[in-house]
Each structure stands twice: as structure tokens, then as C-alpha cells.
Amino acid sequence: MSKPKKQQSNSGTIALNKRAKHEYFVEDRFEAGLALTGWEVKSLRAGKAQLIDSYVLLKDGEAFLFGAHIAPLQTVSTHVVADPIRTRKLLLKARELDKIIGGVQQKGYSCVPLALYWKKHLVKCEIALVRGKKDFDKRETEKQRDWEREKQRIVREVNR
């Protein structure tokens, strides 16, 4: 008889960029791998990552993740010089890269990371082709969110 598998406490999500969903309309989503060093993987396992103010730069037909902060662990990175905000290469298929480059060249579109997460034993980065929101769009989104929350309260009260 085999041992039952342990349930992981988290869903595999390492870091989210909540600000991106507030600032932009998400058009297309892509899953990209990340080229990481050993100490970065160990820090990600400890959950020491932030995607705030990070973005994707497309250069020479390749994609790079800028501004993502992975804090080094004190016990792991004693023998290496750890740069927490170094540029990391995103691993994408050529067809996906062409679609992203074509989208970014259009006026008003950019590419931002939305999340870092585990997929089996690999670290993946969800990136998105986005279009900026105006202030009135942000207010409208907030109104919609509040109305959805209010509807849930009403339904809960009626079902009691």
C-alpha cells in the first residue's frame, strides 16, 4: 500500500502582482519559464519574492523580467554575491514571443508579469499583454467589485 500524498498548504502561488490588475485591462495571458540560479529557487521556496513595479522588456527577440525582487536567504547565499533585482530571462516559445512583440508594438499595449507560481517542480511566470486603464475605468471596476460583493450579501441574507 502506498503512502498518501501530503497536501500542500498553498496553491503553488509564490507572488502576485495585484497592482497590475488594478492598473491595466488584461488582454492575453502567457506562461513563461524563468532562468534562475540556485539561491533564487531556494528563496522562492521560502516565499521571498515581490512583483511590484516589475515589467517585461523585449530586446533582440528575447523577453526579460525587470524589477522582480527575490530576497536572498541569509543561510543560502553566503558564498555568492546575490543581486535581488537582477534581470532574469523569460523562456517562451518563438510563436508566443512573436505574438507578444507584435502586441507591444501596437499603441497603448505593454507586457507585465501577473504572478509567479510553481508548476510541478518548475517556477513559472504568468505574463500578460495589457492595455492601460484611465481613472474612470478604475472607478468603474471598483464599483463593479462593490456591487458583486453587495449581491453576495443580499443572496446570503435571503437564503437564511
Image (tube, rainbow, N blue to C red):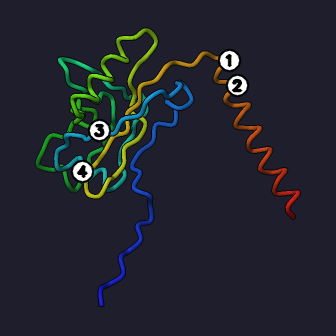
Looking at the image, residue 132 lies above or below residue 78: above
Crowd class of label 1 (few under 14; some 14 to 19; many from 20; radius 10 Å) = few
Residue with the mark numbered 1: 136
* Closer to us: 124 or 78: 124
Q: Earlier in the sequence, mark 2 or mark 3?
A: 3
What is the number of the mark on residue 41?
4
Q: CA distance from mark 4 to mark 1?
A: 40 Å
Q: Earlier in the sequence, mark 4 or mark 1?
A: 4
Q: Nearer the viewer, mark 3 or mark 4?
A: 3
Measured as percent of width and height from the top left, residue 79 is found at 11, 49
Crowd class of label 2 (few under 14; some 14 to 19; many from 20; radius 10 Å) = few
- Identity of the amino acid at label 3? Ala
Marks 1 and 2 close (CB-CB < 8 Å): yes
Q: Nearer the viewer, mark 1 or mark 3?
A: 3
Crowd class of label 4 (few under 14; some 14 to 19; many from 20; radius 10 Å) = some
Image-quadrant location for residue 10: bottom left
Left or right of 79 in this view: 136: right
- The answer to whether one can see residue 22 in this image is yes
Q: Earlier in the sequence, mark 4 or mark 2?
A: 4
The image quadrant where one finds the N terminus is bottom left
- Identity of the amino acid at label 1? Phe
Residue with the mark numbered 3: 32
Marks 4 and 1 close (CB-CB < 8 Å): no
* Closer to us: 70 or 30: 30
Q: CA distance from mark 2 to mark 3?
A: 31 Å
Q: CA distance from mark 1 to mark 3?
A: 32 Å
Residue with the mark numbered 2: 140
- Residue at 31 percent across and 45 percent down: it is 124
Looking at the image, residue 109 lies above or below residue 80: above
